[in-house]
Amino acid sequence: MRNQNYNVPSGISSQFSVNLSLEIFKKMCLVRYFELGLIDAIKEKQVNYQAYLSTGQEAIAAALATEIRDYLVFTQHRAHDVYLTFGGNPKMLRDEFLGLPTGTSQGKAGSNCLQFHQNGLVMFGHHGFIGENVPQAVGAALATKKKTVCFFGDGAAEEDYVFSAMGFAATHKLPVYFVCIDNDLSILTPTKVRRSWKITDIAKAFGMPAIDIADDPWTILHQTQELNNNLPALINCYVCRAHWHVGVGVDDPPEWDRYQLVKNELISLGHEHSISDIEKQVRQSMETLWDKKLLLKPLKQ
Ligand SMILES: Cc1ncc(C[n+]2csc(CCOP(=O)(O)OP(=O)(O)O)c2C)c(N)n1
Ligand SMILES: [Mg+2]
């Protein structure tokens, strides 16, 4: 049942403007090319932090970032995608990896505790317990009454405090958008070994709208527009991670690569030139960001 077209209506991409589709693609490019530079820097030992890579799951954050604005943002350990697509500064993330004082947390937090409170983005990061951000997001929505988005994984979904917080949000009608990034893995263990229930069934039992969908960005946008004003709500997005749980290693090729599928779709809609311009521009800017000559300078300081 988990597949790349799960609950994706046919022809959905053509319901959205070209500009919006290209904006989403540009955000996906930013994550992919930022991480390509990071992967090189790790392989060449210019970066010594562990990296929790988002490559493969870019489409979810990229789509949401175009639709939900001024939300409080709560993320888990794998958050480069949210940071970069919601307006975090790429240079500050690079500097964080280099351990510099100009990094997002002065070079002291690294990849999995990514925070950012600038340029209108209020992003709270991970502290250590997976799923802890769910009660934190619910508490923040209760205290501030602000719309809040909370990203967590299918592994985190199994933590008891996630359920109690979701139940509380449902009872008190708190404006929280729960987004489960479901890559079917908790470190190395697939879902079928871990549990027999679905997080969407749990959310529905609490009385909130919930849906399982593939990570198609247009479907995510469509669902978000439906659910946005009916919070709390949950989407569980099927996605494939390209790299190991942590680090730059790879196993078998992922079941699907949404980046390539989005490119194919945009080409079929006649936007081949636009996407190749966008890719070129983002690739060049990320190559400059990760330029080896520039990198050596701060490392020697
Ligand atoms: C409460 C708790 N239990 C276990 C861990 C160890 N741990 C770190 S990441 C992880 C898997 C997380 O899986 P998921 O939430 O699906 O995110 P993904 O890595 O797949 O993106 C686990 C079990 C932890 N950090 N916190
Ligand atoms: Mg997972």
Image (cartoon, helix red, strand yellow):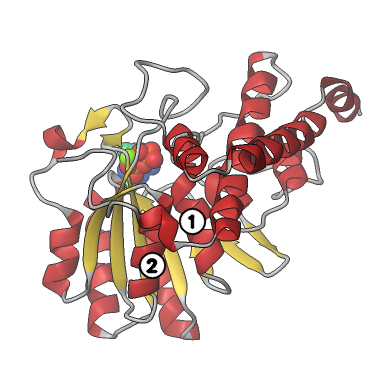
> What amino acid is labelled 2 in the image?
Thr
Percent from the top left, x then y, of residue 102?
81, 46
Screen quadrant of the N terminus: top left
Q: Is 27 left, or right, of 54 in this rendering?
A: right
Tag of residue 224: 2
For mark 2, does the 10 Å Cα neighbourhood hold few (<14), some (14 to 19), or many (20 or more) residues? many
> What amino acid is labelled 1 in the image?
Ala
Q: Is residue 75 visible?
A: no
Mark 1 secondary-structure assignment = helix
Label 1: which residue?
Answer: 63
Find the residue positioned furthest to the front.
270
Q: On screen, 88 above or below 109?
A: below
Residue at disc 2, CB closer than 8 Å to ligand 1: no
Do the residues bearing badges 2 and 1 touch, measured as CB atoms within 8 Å? yes
Mark 2 secondary-structure assignment = helix
**Quadrant of res 23:** bottom right
Screen quadrant of the C terminus: top right
Percent from the top left, x then y, of residue 92?
75, 46
For mark 1, does the 10 Å Cα neighbourhood hold few (<14), some (14 to 19), or many (20 or more) residues? many
Q: Is residue 263 visible?
A: yes
**Quadrant of res 238:** top left
Residue found at x 40% / y 32%: 241
Residue at disc 1, CB closer than 8 Å to ligand 1: no
